[in-house]
Image (tube, coloured by chain):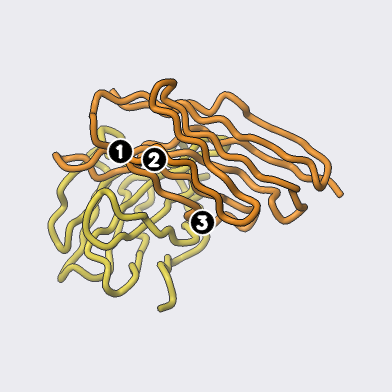
Amino acid sequence: AQKVTQAQTEISVVEKEDVTLDCVYETRDTTYYLFWYKQPPSGELVFLIRRNSFDEQNEISGRYSWNFQKSTSSFNFTITASQVVDSAVYFCALTSFGGSQGNLIFGKGTKLSVKP
Amino acid sequence: DTGVSQDPRHKITKRGQNVTFRCDPISEHNRLYWYRQTLGQGPEFLTYFQNEAQLEKSRLLSDRFSAERPKGSFSTLEIQRTEQGDSAMYLCASSLETSRDEQFFGPGTRLTVL
C-alpha cells in the first residue's frame, strides 16, 4: 500500500526563520513520483515540485529547497528566510508510474504560520 | 490558459437532495481527476478520466456518486440522496497525459449538507 506521512501538523515561525517540513512515504513500487503542493487560505492547491524516484539530486528554487533521500523514504521541504506569504498548508503527495494508478496519495498536510 | 475552473464554488443542500458539480479542465489536458477534502485532511482520490474513459474509481465513490466526462472535455460529479457525511470540498484537477505529469487543481466546490 502507498502512504504519505507528514508528522508535523502545525508549525509556527517568525518571519526570516528557516523552516523544514517533513515528509515520509511508503510504496512498494520502484518507479514513483513525489510532489509538494501549497494550499493557501484561499483554498486552491498550487503545484510546487515533482521529483521522480530515480533522481535523488536535491533541488533549490529561490527560497525553496527539497531534500529527497530514498534510503529513509523522505522528501523534505525547506523554506529559507520565511515570509508571511508562505503561510499555508503544505501537502506532500505520491503517485506511481504506470499500471492502473493515476491518483495522488496525499499526506494530511502541515499548516505553516509565519508571523511578522 | 485560464486554469481549471469549477462550478459552483459553494453549494448548500438538504439531506436527501441530489447535487451536481462541474469541472472544466485546462484545454489541452487529457486527464481529469476528482478528489474530496475534509477539514484538516489531505485530498482523497475519488476517480479519474483519461479523455472520456473513466479509468479508476476509489472505494470512497459509493453508488450514490457518479461522474461523467462526455467528449473528453468538461466533467460532472453527481451525488444522489446526499448525506451529512458528504459535506466536504470537492476538488477537480487535470494533467497532460500520465501519472508523472503534475496535476493542476481548481478552486473546489464546497458542499454543505444540512
CA separation, marks 2 and 3? 14 Å
Element on which disc 3 rests: strand
**In front here: A13 or B90?**
A13
Question: Which residue is disc 3 drawn over?
Answer: A46
- In the rendered image, the vertical position of residue A83 relative to residue A6, given as above or below: below
**Relative to residue A21, is residue A37 drawn left or right?**
left
- Mark 2 belongs to which amino acid? Leu
User: Mark 2, mark 3: which one is toward the viewer?
Assistant: 2
Q: How many marks?
A: 3
Disc marking residue A54: 1
Q: Chain of mark 1?
A: A
CA separation, marks 1 and 3? 24 Å
- Mark 1 belongs to which amino acid? Phe
Element on which disc 2 rests: strand
Chain B: give its colour: yellow
Disc marking residue A80: none
- Residue at point 50%, 53% (across, down): A48
**In front here: B49 or B65?**
B49
Disc marking residue A34: 2
Label 2: few (<14), some (14–19) or many (≥20) C-alpha neighbours in 10 Å:
many
Mark 2 or mark 1: which comes first in sequence?
Answer: 2
Residue A27, how many percent across, how many down? 30, 25
Q: Chain of mark 3?
A: A
Chain A: give its colour: orange
Residue A4, how many percent across, how many down? 43, 29
